[in-house]
Image: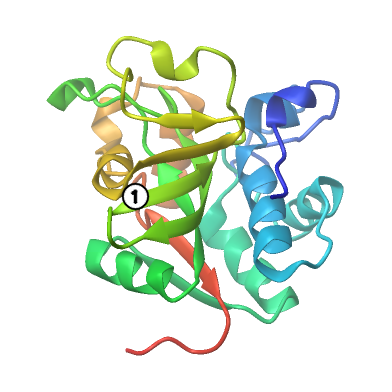
């Protein structure tokens, strides 16, 4: 299984916010903001077996302007990734559709929304916005296999996260419903006034987790 951990790349600059007037940032790195490009690299190589290095994924993201949030706008990047590797792409928040496609061998990039203090939810994979890759699904147990580009020792021992993830090295397992709960959207009003993420959401007129799952696979899925 091909895996990339963004924490290994604090030395690689990944400029962000480039689409928002006056908000270009050159201090962001793969370590701080590169979960999206790490996820794109992992999903392509694990799904297709073709090489798509982190450097290639970052280059594509910058070239198509997907790096204009505090990290990566997967809504912009995903279609270019799918086109380059001739993959089917489905963007959805529908749990039954996600299960159906994962069961057909699709893999997904899941958009994690993070903590939601307004409903007392502690983010499992991140306290803020994040992307993880779903590489497998077991319909019998409703468990998903996940690669988390920001996995660090003790991450899933924090209060509110204990017992929700089974770790086998960098390969993680959790219930699909647990992952889906971590991807529920938040209203812009809950983000701090003036924060990069809120500025970007306001500028793009998006809502966080607008499409919680970006599913990639071979062939056409049924409507």
Q: As drawn, is 55 to the left or to the right of 195?
A: right
Residue occupying the point 31% across, 63% down: 139
Whether residue 30 is visible here, answered yes or no, is yes
Which residue is more in the foreground, 66 or 111?
111
Q: Colour scheme in the image?
A: rainbow
Give the vertical position of 64 relative to 36 (above or below).
below
Tag 1: Cα neighbours inside 10 Å, few (<14), some, or many (≥20)? some
Q: Position of residue 117 (x, y in %)?
A: 21, 20
Residue occupying the point 77% across, 24% down: 8
Which residue is more in the foreground, 217 or 145?
145
Q: As drawn, is 38 to the left or to the right of 97?
A: right
Which residue is more in the foreground, 14 or 101?
101
Whether residue 25 is visible here, answered yes or no, is no
Q: As drawn, is 217 to the left or to the right of 156?
A: right
Give the vertical position of 6 relative to 220 (above or below).
above
Q: As drawn, is 175 to the left or to the right of 45?
A: left
Q: Position of residue 70 (x, y in %)?
A: 58, 34
Could you tell me which secondary element the residue under label 1 belongs to?
strand
């Amino acid at each position: 299984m091909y895996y990339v951990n963004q924490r290994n790349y604090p030395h690689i600059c990944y400029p962000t916010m480039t689409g928002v007037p006056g908000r270009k940032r050159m201090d962001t790195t793969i370590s701080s903001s590169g979960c999206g490009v790490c996820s794109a690299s992992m999903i392509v190589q694990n799904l297709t077996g073709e090489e798509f290095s982190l450097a290639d994924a970052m280059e594509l993201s910058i070239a198509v302007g997907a790096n204009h949030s505090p990290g990566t706008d997967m809504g912009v990047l995903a279609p270019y990734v799918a086109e380059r590797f001739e993959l089917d792409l489905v963007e959805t928040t529908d749990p039954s559709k996600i299960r159906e496609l994962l069961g057909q061998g699709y893999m997904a990039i899941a958009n994690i929304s993070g903590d939601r203090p307004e409903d007392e939810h502690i983010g499992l994979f991140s306290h803020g916005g994040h992307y993880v890759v779903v590489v497998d699904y077991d319909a019998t147990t409703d468990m998903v296999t996940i690669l988390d580009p920001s996995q660090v020792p003790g991450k899933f021992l924090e209060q509110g996260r204990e017992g929700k993830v089974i770790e086998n090295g960098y390969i993680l397992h959790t219930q699909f419903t647990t992952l889906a709960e971590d991807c529920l959207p938040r209203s812009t009003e809950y983000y701090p006034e003036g924060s990069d993420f809120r500025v970007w959401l306001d500028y793009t007129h998006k809502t966080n987790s607008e499409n919680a799952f970006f599913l990639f696979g071979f062939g056409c899925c049924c409507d």
